[in-house]
Amino acid sequence: MIEDVLNFYANVSKKFYPFIIILALILAVVSFQQASKTEISTDILGFFYQDTEGMSETRMLRSDFMGTDTVKILIEADRIVTKDVLEDDVLDMTLELVDTVSIIPGVFRVSSVLDLGNSRDDILHNSFAETSDYLSTELQYSIIIIELDSAEVPDRAELIDTFKKTVNRVDLAKGTKVTVAGSPALYNAWDHAVRTGFAKSIIASAVTISVVLFFVFRSPITSSFVMIPILVAVLTAFGTMHFINIPLNFLTVMFGAVTLGLGVDYSIHLVQRYHEELRKGNNNALNVALSRIGRNTIFTGLTTMAAFSSMTVSGLRMLMEYGVMSFIAISFSVLSVLLFLPSFLILESKIGSRKFELSKIFKALGLAGFLSTLMIKLSTFSLKRPIAVIFFVSVGCVPVFYGLSQIETLTDVDAWLPQENPSVKANNIIDDEFGDYDYTMILVLADDIRDPIVMRAIEKIGEGVQKVPHITEVSSISSLIHPLPTKERSIHGKIEALPLDTRRKYVTEDYTESLIIIKTDKEVDDIMVREIKEVLDYVDKPAEVVFSQAGANLLMSRIDSIIAQDQIRTTMVSLALVMTMLFFAMRGVSGIILGLSPILLSILFAMGTMGLLQIPSTPLTVMLATLLLGLGIDYSIHFIARYREERMNGKTLEEALLITSSTVGESIALTSITTTFGFLSLMTIMLVPVQDFGKIAAVGLVFCAIFVPIIISVGLLFYEKIVRKRMIPLLYPGKA
């Protein structure tokens, strides 16, 4: 049925190819216009669903309170506190910086070395204690702390650009360096990395893949015609992002380059089979190629989509969005290749595809012949030396399992950017010189926070939390008016007497919300969160009053457990869906076993390599198993399908494998190279987890390309020589 439809469409393409080509180009232009409207989001909260525990509280924290987010300006000098330097240079510069940034919209309060005294003379004669919040121990660094009114800062990345422009207008003291730091500065760096990396990765992927295609086909016309349908698919996918309101973020920024590599895979298989039939003198080359390869492309596309769709069950919103966009992009790639590429192949035959005669050096580097020979040798060796193959794979598992034991999880967002980034450097200096600390919060909701019963509950919880390990300071509205008055009127008076900026940091204007701010001497982790929760559960409090943990750090502390759950859940769902699709594609149990074995082995080796290379687990590497399962199974389907075709034509085991390895094997090798370049293009995105993912995904795909001919050949030998003789044929239903 599928073959008949594809054969019919091949005839349609021959007749209407000019109109189909024009349609493809129009679709590309329209999609590009829509893609340009896609929003970019680098907010860390974008990782999580709206109903994630602590999410709504964190959004309330951002919208209702002041001072919960801070920007820091780091001042560096050989020595800041010598009277002459401070008086004549640094002090004046600091004063100008404070005055300038104070008027930026969204700034709530500014603190600096100027707070050490009421006058220049007071500041100069201050003892500059080692514990100063604004001066480092060695007096080489000073910081300006800028607290933000989160409700007035809708775009933190944009705000940092404003800060940088403002700082650049200030006359710096001789021998000083000023850097904008803090969490919002990291958001700004992420935003820049996503914006620039998106275009860079696609361009790098398109250029490198085009070069590879030129060495394969030796024709710029053929190479271009292979690329155009995939570019159409990528643009259409990005255009769709705008309609379904999925932003460009840390994860979705990757799928363009990856889709290019994957889409070219589908194209190469079709073009290679088309050219093979032409060399045979087949006048219906397009019909044969499209009906045979098209069917495999549909099934490989469906299995890959099934694999990526497993990410929709992820506990992280960004992973779910990546799964949705990958599903859409792959479906568009399959459709674009099947609908548009045949017309471009017809056009190629009409205008001719002039092949360039490459120099001897380039011929020596010729990919097609070399890869064909390599795949034949791998398959032949596996047939002749199956025991040796099993031995070498088993030995290779030893370092792989060791590598698996070395994988660690990385959730420190500071480490997601290159260490040479100015904001990262500044943050590291601040941590080293001013103390590596973190914050988390408890949000209190009540009819009136000033109620004496509520205030005492806040006080008791603060006292209990203070006893949790690694918590250094707990502040709240009750601690600011300690000791607590017993009468409500007195509490009202004391709170009203607090400075407005202090009061607004801890309570809202209507006194229905309050914050307990918790300072720690280490990064907030899941253990600390659990211990704080135990305090909240243990301390007696009014039933109508709600105490909830909140803050971005709280949410990030849960990533470890979410990643661990996702790793298992998405892999299992992906495996189940792929096995289902394989059953229909292979029409037999043996096909499932043969198809999955090399891919599961590749996943194992890739993750082991990940540990050996000390690449940590991140929200991105959760996708590795699913990605390789979806991409690698394509190779298995094409390999087994061509082998079955040749066996049905009366070829022996050895003959069928020889033909399969020299044709489909060559295509697998070529497509693995193009997709690998797609992954490696992610190195142009200046986000460490994205770069790590690109590297290990490329390694995993190489394993897939190697293991498919080796493991399937050994499996077929075992099946043909042992299983098929003793059991009902499962690989070829209906044929003994």
Image (cartoon, helix red, strand yellow):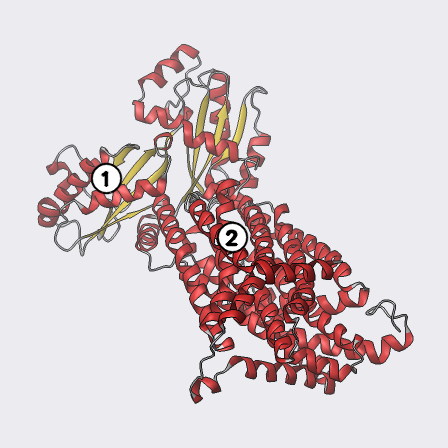
**Which residue lies under the disc numbered 1?**
112
Give whichever of 40, 466 is nearer the camera: 40
Q: Does 102 sit above or below residue 685?
A: above
Q: Nearer the viewer, mark 1 or mark 2?
A: 2
Give whichever of 84, 691 is nearer the camera: 691
**In the shown orientation, is residue 642 left or right of residue 520?**
right
Q: Does 199 sit above or below residue 349?
A: above
Q: Quadrant of residue 16?
A: bottom right
Using the numbered discs, state the Cα–Cα distance from disc 1 to disc 2 in whole angstroms. Answer: 62 Å
Q: Residue furthest front?
A: 15
Q: Quadrant of the C terminus?
A: bottom right
Kind of element beneath mark 1: loop
Q: Residue at x 30, y 32 (%)?
A: 106
Q: Quadrant of the N terminus?
A: bottom right
Is residue 132 visible in the rendered structure shown here?
no
Kind of element beneath mark 2: helix
**Which residue lies under the disc numbered 2?**
23
- Say which amino acid is labelled 1: Ser
Give whichever of 223, 123 is nearer the camera: 223
